[in-house]
Image: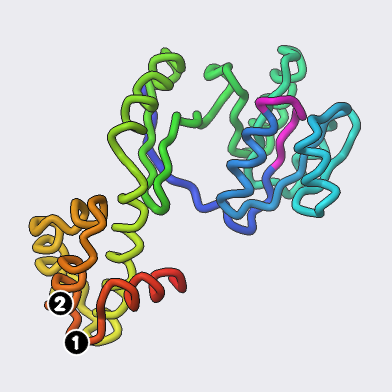
Amino acid sequence: MKYYPVNLDVRHHSCLVVGGGAVGTRKVRTLLDCGAVVTVVSPEVTNQIFDLAQENRISLKQRPYQASDLDGVFLVIGATDNKDLNRAIHDDARKQGKLCNIADQPDLCNFILPSIIERGDLIIAISTSGKSPAFARRLRKQLEAQFGPEYAEFLKLMGAMRKILLERTRDPEAHRQVFVSLIDQGLLECIRDGDRARIDTMLISVLGPGYGYDWVSERGDDI
């Protein structure tokens, strides 16, 4: 199996999670973090899922799964420990042409979920194409130690600068070398080391007087 790597925009899309245990809870939280509109179907659910429903952050149907639950759904995740039910979810999703993932059963998926590392807008996905989730988790732990919180701040600054420069000249190619130069000068390392003075010098050299770290960082919060 050769998978086609892709990042999905699930914002405001209806997504269904069948199963309310620990695995289902993790899937729900990831979908919510990405802006999805989530419905959970399961007779029993964790306290976390119940609380999310009470807070109106998700829709909860505490009953067995029905094929009609797929109506109008963009994506479905099966997170139950019932193989027959998982197969039924897969078969129903295939008939309706839905994106479907069945946890820990790659043969019942038309997409799989990689192990991920998130540092703000930096997302590193690790996949073994379903061959060894345990090894994917091992790699994730190794990379988590390598990529610290400075990457999130770095991307926030880069995004803010890109927005400012595009407001001045709407030509992304014209600014490419500017960003390459900032990377080469060690902007990331300065953020990691907390060297505000050098960061200010770099930003002002690109954006002009008044555009120091604090101003640009605040602007990044609006992006």
Task: Identify whether 117 is placed above or below 10.
Answer: above
Which quadrant would the C terminus be assigned to in this image?
A: bottom left
User: What residue is rendered at 32% in x and 66% in y?
Assistant: 159
* Spot occupied by residue 167 in the image (x, y as percentages of width and height): 30, 84
Which of the 4 quarters of the picture holds residue 201? bottom left
Q: Is residue 75 left or right of residue 158?
A: right
* Spot occupied by residue 44 in the image (x, y as percentages of width and height): 86, 27
Number of other residues with Cα within 10 Å of mark 2, as a class: few under 14, some 14 to 19, many 20 or more = some
The span shown in magenta is 16-23
In magenta stretch: residue 129? no
Q: Which amino acid does the dot numbered 2 rest on?
A: Val
Q: Is residue 177 left or right of residue 4?
A: left
Which of the 4 quarters of the picture holds residue 2? top left
Q: Is residue 33 left or right of residue 185?
A: right
Residue at disc 1, secondary structure? loop
According to the picture, the residue beneath numbered tag 2 turns out to be 206
Q: Observer-nearest residue: 116 or 182?
A: 182
Which quadrant would the N terminus be assigned to in this image?
A: top left
